[in-house]
């Protein structure tokens, strides 16, 4: 019986669930920090905190990061092997994913939670769209970087 020091061959199926989860976690945090910094500069974090009954920007930032991680995991765990195959595609898919969450989050879910009108498009909403596009692009790029190590 001989032992081999060679690594096992990579599966054609792509990255493992654990690797895809790591990509979503790290990508979600990276995109969330960048977007959170913009939200802090615009004074938007207390509104995020209001979703959980607080008005603290710190609580708002923590809630925002948790949401960013969950959204990141959604992209990478479900679609990582299919859609996040190279950097250009990762950035494009991530930005499109961010745009979808812009509609779902600040245009629908947040206003419902806070008793505000749905689908209000104003300067704040457009700023939020830019932040969501940036978040998604960063998420996609970071995720591809992590996933590439297992392809």
Image (cartoon, helix red, strand yellow):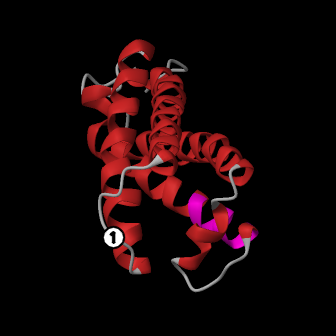
Residue position for label 1: 117
Location of residue 20 (image quadrant):
top left
Near-viewer residue (3 or 147)? 147
Near-viewer residue (37 or 80)? 37
- Residue 67 is situated, as x and y percent measured from the top left of the image, at 50, 60
- Secondary structure that dominates the magenta span: helix
Q: Is residue 132 left or right of residue 65?
A: left
Q: Residue at x 39, y 40 (%)?
A: 98
Q: Is residue 96 above or below residue 68?
A: above
Q: Is residue 68 above or below residue 6?
A: below
Q: Residue at x 54, y 29 (%)?
A: 142
- Quarter the C terminus occupies: top left
Q: Residue at x 45, y 58 (%)?
A: 70
- Quarter the N terminus occupies: top left
How many numbered discs?
A: 1
Residue 9 visible in the displayed image = no
- Residue 79 is situated, as x and y percent measured from the top left of the image, at 27, 38
How many residues crowd mark 1 within 10 Å: few (<14), some (14–19), many (20+)? few
Check the image and name the residue furthest to the front: 122
- The residue stretch that appears in magenta: 58-64
Q: Residue at x 38, y 70 (%)?
A: 111
Location of residue 62 (image quadrant):
bottom right
- Residue 89 is situated, as x and y percent measured from the top left of the image, at 35, 18
- Residue 10 is situated, as x and y percent measured from the top left of the image, at 36, 22
Secondary element under disc 1, as helix, strand or loop, is loop
Residue 56 visible in the displayed image = yes
Check the image and name the residue furthest to the bottom: 53
Q: Is residue 94 magenta?
A: no
Q: Is residue 55 left or right of residue 129?
A: right
């Amino acid at each position: 019986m001989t032992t081999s020091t060679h690594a096992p061959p990579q599966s054609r199926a792509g990255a493992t669930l654990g690797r895809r989860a790591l990509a979503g976690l790290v990508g979600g945090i990276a995109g969330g920090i960048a977007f959170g910094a913009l939200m802090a500069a615009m004074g938007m974090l207390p509104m995020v905190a209001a979703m959980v009954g607080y008005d603290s920007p710190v609580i708002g930032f923590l809630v925002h990061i948790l949401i960013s991680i969950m959204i990141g995991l959604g992209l990478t765990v479900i679609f990582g092997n299919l859609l996040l195959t190279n950097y250009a595609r990762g950035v494009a898919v991530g930005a499109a994913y961010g745009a979808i969450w812009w509609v779902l989050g600040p245009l629908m879910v947040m206003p419902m939670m806070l008793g505000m009108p749905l689908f209000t498009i104003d300067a704040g909403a457009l700023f939020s769209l830019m932040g969501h596009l940036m978040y998604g692009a960063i998420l996609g790029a970071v995720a591809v970087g992590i996933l590439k190590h297992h392809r």
